[in-house]
Amino acid sequence: MKAAVYLFLVAFLALASSCAFASDPSPLQDFCVAINDTKTTAAVFVNGKFCKDPKLATANDFFFHGLKEGNTSNQLGSKVTLITAKEILGLNTLGVSLARVDFAPKGLNPPHIHPRATELFTVLEGTLYAGFVTSNPENRLFTKILNKGDVFVFPKGLIHFQMNVGKSKALAISGLSSQDPGRVDIANTVFGSDPSISQEVLTKAFQLDKGTISYLQKQF
Ligand SMILES: *[C@@H]1O[C@H](CO)[C@@H](O)[C@H](O)[C@H]1NC(C)=O
Ligand SMILES: *[C@@H]1O[C@H](CO)[C@@H](O)[C@H](O)[C@H]1NC(C)=O
């Protein structure tokens, strides 16, 4: 009887701890440089990717050259350049990645979420209006005007955005707590999914008429 209770407790604690640590799994070795071979990696995924023999790893596996200014000539006036384990294979299993975000004057990085990462956003140039919204039922908005040298946190999974409110271009670098943070743009995913979400769903969800929904769907 005692043994059964003990086993139950162990199983319960194991389950509880696996629920509590909902971040990238910790590596059990110094590094695991991913093999950049789509044929091999398509077969089986071990902690994301297969590892290269550590003896064959080189400095270039941990290096990226040319984090250049992004082209902001688009509708939103912003460009995100991501450096994940796809770009630096040595980042595989290490639980971090990076983004460079360029903004034209009035440029917007639209409301989006990273399903797998908290973001540390650091402004290197310009002035940005940034914010995030908490989950239901509070849906509380936290905002800040950020200048050069300012850092703001976007907690994992929450909707957030940044807009350039200065007169010149703006630049920020983000650290993200996953080797593959993922990104869900709210407007694109809802109004630009492929295939489209039915208009009946969208009209009811957003309390809008069909014409407005059609108009929004055409934008994405
Ligand atoms: C930036 O993007 C625009 C629109 O796609 C394109 O016309 C332009 O040539 C690009 N500029 C550079 C420097 O690549
Ligand atoms: C990985 O392979 C792809 C396709 O061959 C290539 O485009 C990409 O630059 C490679 N990435 C690295 C980090 O070597």
Image (tube, grey):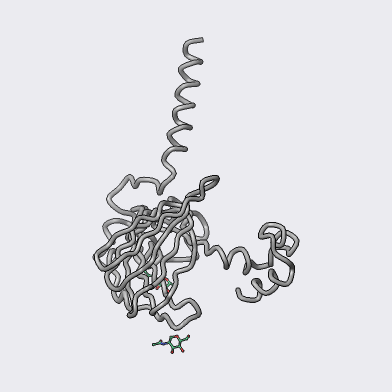
In the rendered image, the residue lying farthest to the top is 1
Question: Residue 61: percent from the left, percent from the top?
Answer: 30, 65
Location of residue 48 in the rendering, given as x and y in whole percent from the top left corner: 44, 54
Q: Nearer the viewer, residue 11 or 108?
A: 108
Horizontal side, residue 136 vs residue 207: left or right: left
The number of discs equals 0
Residue at 73% in and 64% down: 199
Residue 36 x, y percent position in the rendering: 41, 65
- Pick whichever, 95 or 155, lies toward us: 155
| Res 218 quadrant in image | bottom right
Q: Is residue 185 left or right of residue 218?
A: left
Examine the image and state in which quarter residue 119 appears. Answer: bottom left
Residue at 45% over, 59% down: 160
* Residue 194 image-quadrant placement: bottom right
The answer to whether any part of residue 52 appears in the image is no
Looking at the rendered image, the quarter that the C terminus falls into is bottom right
Q: In the figure, 79 relative to 99: above or below?
A: below
Q: In the image shown, does 196 or 165 lie closer to the viewer?
A: 165
Residue 16 percent location from the top left of the image: 46, 32
Q: Is residue 150 visible?
A: yes
Name the residue located 51 percent from the left edge and 10 percent from the top edge.
1
Q: Is residue 102 above or below residue 185?
A: below
Task: Indicate which quadrant contains ligand 2.
Answer: bottom left
- 92 lies left or right of 45: left
